[in-house]
Image (spheres, rainbow, N blue to C red):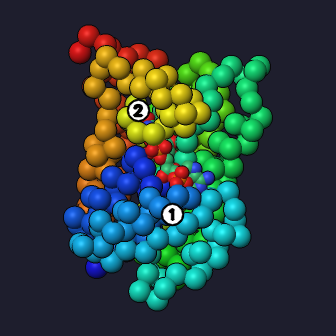
Amino acid sequence: MKTALITGATSGIGKSTAIEFAKLNIKLILCGRRQDRLDLLKNELSKKVQVHTLCFDVRDKKMVFSAIENLPEAFKTIDILINNAGNAHGLDPIQTGNLEDWDAMIDINVKGLLYVSKAIIPKMIAQKSGHIINIGSTAAKEVYPNGNVYCASKHAVDAINKGMRMDLNQYGIRVGGIHPGLVQTEFSNVRFKGDDQKADNVYKGYAPLTPEDIADIIAFVVTRPYHVNIADLVVFPTAQASSTMINKSL
Ligand code: NDP
Ligand code: 8X3
């Protein structure tokens, strides 16, 4: 039985991935900052698989390393890492961008992903196996107006994904990036700092991707035979052709 550690499992893509993995009988280490949500998900999924929760902020490297170092024996072997925790903070032109938003995006989306990876990679190297999936974004592939620093953070994830794959290939560790377009989650509620109407408007007038769509793809990726590594996967809703082209007549 495999074990997966999922960051950002309290909501959206991470939560749906946890639900999908439980169906595949994958043991779960669920991470996030909201312990109440982790507990609820653990209660639900424990009926199917063993679940352990880790409550930490990916920005806090001490917490990250200590949580992963002190995993209970039954969860010490991590086969799959889903580097998913992340968000956009704000949607402002560069000239009026908020420094705290910039720090949050770089610290969470880039440095947080690196800390979690650094805590787990030595275990995978020792095992000579492992599968790391980095959740980038179409914002990792293109830049859109006012997306400046979020896009930069996701371009960094794309570069880290490629670099990781090269460096870890010698150990038989698979590394791949999944880059979704618009997915309706709490993402826009976070981006617009709790302005739910503004967030809902992002997904109005067309069918966005759902977190279940992405979880389904992640489940496909991790169930390929060992000799198959899906290295880079971009997925849009059908109504979206690029970051700025959304066809509301479909
Ligand atoms: P959600 O806001 O629904 O989920 C974000 C998750 O990240 C939450 O579980 C949250 O948990 C966790 N998280 C955020 N900040 C931290 C932190 N500092 N420390 C630990 N965990 C944190 O958004 P999505 O599910 O949409 O986002 C998941 C990933 O997908 C992100 O990397 C996002 O950039 C990416 N993505 C999203 C797209 C979209 O359109 N929705 C499209 C492309 C990529 P908690 O608050 O409990 O800590
Ligand atoms: C999330 C999708 O287009 O808001 O990464 O950047 S987008």
The residue depicted at 55 percent of the width and 37 percent of the height is 190
Mark 1: amino acid: Gln
List x then y, in percent, for residue 112. 63, 56
Count the labels in the image.
Answer: 2
Q: On screen, 162 above or below 61?
A: above
User: Could you classify mark 1 by the number of other residues whose Cα lies within 10 Å: few (under 14), some (14-19), or many (20 or more)?
Assistant: some
List x then y, in percent, for residue 184. 38, 35
Relative side of 36 to 184, left or right: right
**Disc 2 beta carbon < 8 A from ligand 2?**
yes
Q: Work out whether residue 160 can be spotted.
A: no
Q: On screen, 39 above or below 244?
A: below
Most foreground residue, 97 or 241: 97
* The C terminus, quarter of image: top left
Q: On screen, 92 above or below 40?
A: above
Q: Do the residues bearing badges 1 and 2 touch, measured as CB atoms within 8 Å?
A: no
Mark 2: amino acid: Gly
**First in residue order: circle 1 vs circle 2:** 1
User: Could you classify mark 2 by the number of other residues whose Cα lies within 10 Å: few (under 14), some (14-19), or many (20 or more)?
Assistant: many
Front position among marks 1 and 2:
1
CA distance separating discs 1 and 2: 28 Å
Could you tell me which secondary element the residue under label 1 belongs to?
helix
The residue depicted at 48 percent of the width and 38 percent of the height is 187
* The N terminus, quarter of image: bottom left
Most foreground residue, 226 or 211: 211
Q: Give me the disc on residue 35.
A: 1
List x then y, in percent, for residue 40. 38, 63
The residue depicted at 33 percent of the width and 69 percent of the height is 43
Q: Work out whether residue 110 can be spotted.
A: yes
Q: Which residue is mark 2?
A: 181
Q: Give me the disc on residue 227.
A: none
Could you tell me which secondary element the residue under label 2 belongs to?
loop
